[in-house]
Amino acid sequence: MSALSDRPTLEFQGISGGYGGSEIIHDISIRVGAGEIVTLIGPNGAGKSSVMNATFGQLQINGGRILLKGEEITGIAPEQAVRRGISYVPQVSNVFPNLTVQENLEIGAWIRRDDFRPRMEEMFALFPPLSERRRIPAGALSGGQRQMAAMAKALMVDPEILLLDEPTAGLSPRFRGEIFAVVRKVNARGIPILMVEQNARQALGIADRGYVLVDGHCRMEGSGKDLLANPEVGAMFLGRRADEETSPAPNPGSEAPAVDGSTTQSMRP
Amino acid sequence: MDSLYGIFLYAIYLLTMGGIYAVLVMGLNIQWGFTGLFNAGIAGFFAVGAYTSAIISTASSGRHLGGLSLPLWASLPGAMIASALIAWAVAWICIRLRSDYLAIATLGIAEILRLVLKNEDWATNGARGISRIPKPFEDLPEPWNQIAMLLLVLAILLVLYLLLERARRAPWGRVMTAIRENEAAARAAGKNVEGFRIEAFVLGGALMGLGGALMAHHVKFIDPNMAEPLSTTFIVWVMLIIGGSGNNKGALFGAFLVWTLWSTSEIVTTRLPAEWELKSAYLRFFLVGLALQIILQRYPAGILKEHRPIGK
Amino acid sequence: MNELIGFVNFHLIPGIVLGSIYALGAIGLTLTFGILRFANFAHGETMTLGAFVALVVIDLTNWHVLATLPFAMLLTVLTVLVMDRLFFRPLRTGPTVILLIASFGLMLMMRSAIQIIWGVDLETLSKGLAIPWVLFESLRIFPKHLLIVGAALLLMLGVHGLLRHTPIGKAMRAMSDSPELARMTGIDTERVVMATWITGAVLAAAAGVLLAYDTHLDSRMGFRVLLPIFAAALLGGLGRPYGAMAGGLVIGVAEELSTYSWIGDGPLVSPGYKSGVAFAIMIALLIWRPSGLFRGRVF
Ligand SMILES: Nc1ncnc2c1ncn2[C@@H]1O[C@H](COP(=O)(O)OP(=O)(O)O)[C@@H](O)[C@H]1O
Ligand SMILES: [Mg+2]
């Protein structure tokens, strides 16, 4: 591969920021390489959504840089971010509830200059449940279908990268599986994905790499497999089943690959 | 000598009217400045106060409700209670909704009150209004009656100012500020946000009623056009915003400043030819609106900024 | 039978006419509320402006009232766009209640300007006596009532087409749903805001002209209908254009029916309180169902 494509699609270099007064995330360095699925896990309130918001100018950034394919986009306005090729599916209110599914997709294609109809049919093929419901207001969809609509809307442009904030929150296991399958399908088209997830096990299962966020600090990073096997991660996020995966009880802190706040920019194995 | 005396009397008139407006502005300051509650119907609360005190204090006339001939110590509190009751009803309905609803409802209540005052002849003498409202100290000789009235208004203003300054620094005022700055946090701290808001709205309404009562006693005559929303409501808003909302000194300052400008500009416009005199009256209103816009954009904090009671 | 004809002639038909005028006004109000997030107190004065422009055109040309509509709309749109640029846009990033105060100030400025230019006297758009068509020997229909309702219906159809079938209309609905998501989708919000003002001003100008055509015009007409159109927008659910159409019709009909002798011989509500009907409906709504019949925004 050429040196150019080694450049990560999205890169955070020591980003700190917050809303108004208090700082929420501290010195966050993450990157999403070409074609990767990267997941961000961590307890509620850790600042995962805030990390996503930082790319869309929704967070006040106090330090660090954000690069998209090597170009700095720190503090860019939301309407510019999407024009640069970042598509974002926020955690809540990610569809227009009073617009039909089809209208949501049309609006999703707002910045396209060309004919978006082929793309729309592609999306309906990718999400068959939406195809039958194109004339229904998005607000009337079930939770799972709503997430699909939100993803389809975000994919109406040809994004350089897709950001998903907890796409499976509140879904039944069946729908969860469906969403994860779609995430892989989208990724198989070559679109890199940065995904925040509560269902750490499944997310790490499909992710190339993952980061663990605690209290606004990046505590660990590694490949999806490594993090899944990591006893501390197991204890923190994978619930009681942690001891099923690793027999010795984890010694908190000692095995963390990164010390509080500072992360090691380890190369991908 | 004569003209000097005239100027002296005019100054007393300016200060008395400015003082009455200052009472209204302090009422709005409690609602908007301290608590962030919009009120587009100041004229309505003002009119209720004016009519209530007129009905309580006038002698029997047969043309309207009343004939109680009660003195000031009954008519002023009566006016405050009547306005407070209406404020309470409006607040109770609208306080949990977003500010636009309160704005629309207060505009509506002022309009309805105007209709009632105009249509309920038996109580209000309809469009002809109520005259011969007793004025305090009117039996004193010429300048002294005016001076005494001014002193009464200023004394009331001073008491109000001291009370409000105390309330602002007291826990009550601090909770108000907290609610306005961060409602969610105040709620999380277990404060009854709705309760506090209703209290503020009612208190502000009572002061507007008091202002109305003072005006009725001062000019001795009232009619339903007093509730004309443009003149009263706007001027009070402009006074508060220019003076600096959230600041009681600012409220006082804004009231006297705007009233002086408003009233003295009338001296100029009445000298114009008749055709222009009428137009210039509208021009003055236009300029008041324009002043409001300029202040909103350029000096959003007003001339005297708010001083927070707690370090924050 | 006579009773029924009287009811239809003097209450129902005027109610429908007034209701379709209110509907036009309420749509503009509800659109600006949905997209700019504030109750625009200057909307009534915008209607007044439209009516006076029509008066000027009629004085100059002696055209039919409906032919003046394009001019009234054009001038009103231009005025509203200038007002947005001068008074609303600088405040757009702050709290929306400041926009509310600004619109309150603008209401005063517009009315004063209209009074300076055109005075305060009562004027009419169509001179001469109107002769009704008589159907079934007793049902009286004024041609101008048909024209007013027809024009209002056409405009409402236009709004429907705009919101459902044009990209900018869909973007307006999207922004009304969620301004944040609209920005994240790349919608240039200033363009949507502009489209909203234009739509609102076109409808307000039409409402003003039609109201003046139905009755008369004076500098206070906009303020008089402000409360009914607020009530109509509330009834339909703030931010909901279709709700506003229904709400306008309900308020207009309710106002006219309120003076019918439902109980006994006299009118149910004395004519002096006719404008209180809208307020009463509004208060009932705020108490029992503040989101309106069609679920608008409360917070
Ligand atoms: N818009 C906001 N304004 C102020 N604080 C916020 C905002 N959004 C989130 N926060 C705060 O930031 C912290 C992190 O939130 P968030 O990034 O949503 O965490 P997560 O997505 O990991 O659950 C929380 O304490 C939350 O209260
Ligand atoms: Mg989150």
Image (cartoon, rainbow, N blue to C red):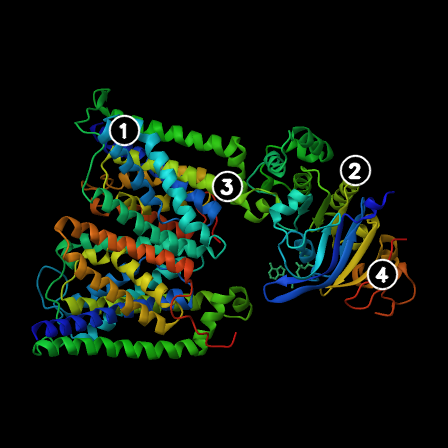
The residue lying toward the viewer, choosing from C33 and A63, is A63
Q: Where is residue B225 in the image (x, y as percent from the top left)?
A: 20, 55
Numbered label attached to residue C282 = none
Give me the chain letter of mark 2.
A
Numbered label attached to residue A242 = 4
Which residue is label 1 attached to? Answer: C65
Question: What's the CA distance linking mark 4 and mark 3?
Answer: 52 Å
Give me the chain letter of mark 4.
A
Amino acid bearing label 3: Val
Amino acid bearing label 2: Arg
Q: What element carries label 1?
A: helix
Which residue is label 3 attached to? Answer: C192
Amino acid bearing label 1: Val
Q: What element carries label 2?
A: loop
Question: What's the CA distance linking mark 4 and mark 1?
Answer: 79 Å
Verify CB contact (< 8 Å) between mark 4 and mark 3.
Answer: no
Amino acid bearing label 4: Ala
Q: Where is residue C8 in the image (x, y as percent from the top left)?
A: 26, 30
Could you tell me if residue C289 is visible in this image?
Answer: no
Question: What's the CA distance linking mark 2 and mark 1?
Answer: 61 Å
Verify CB contact (< 8 Å) between mark 1 and mark 3.
Answer: no
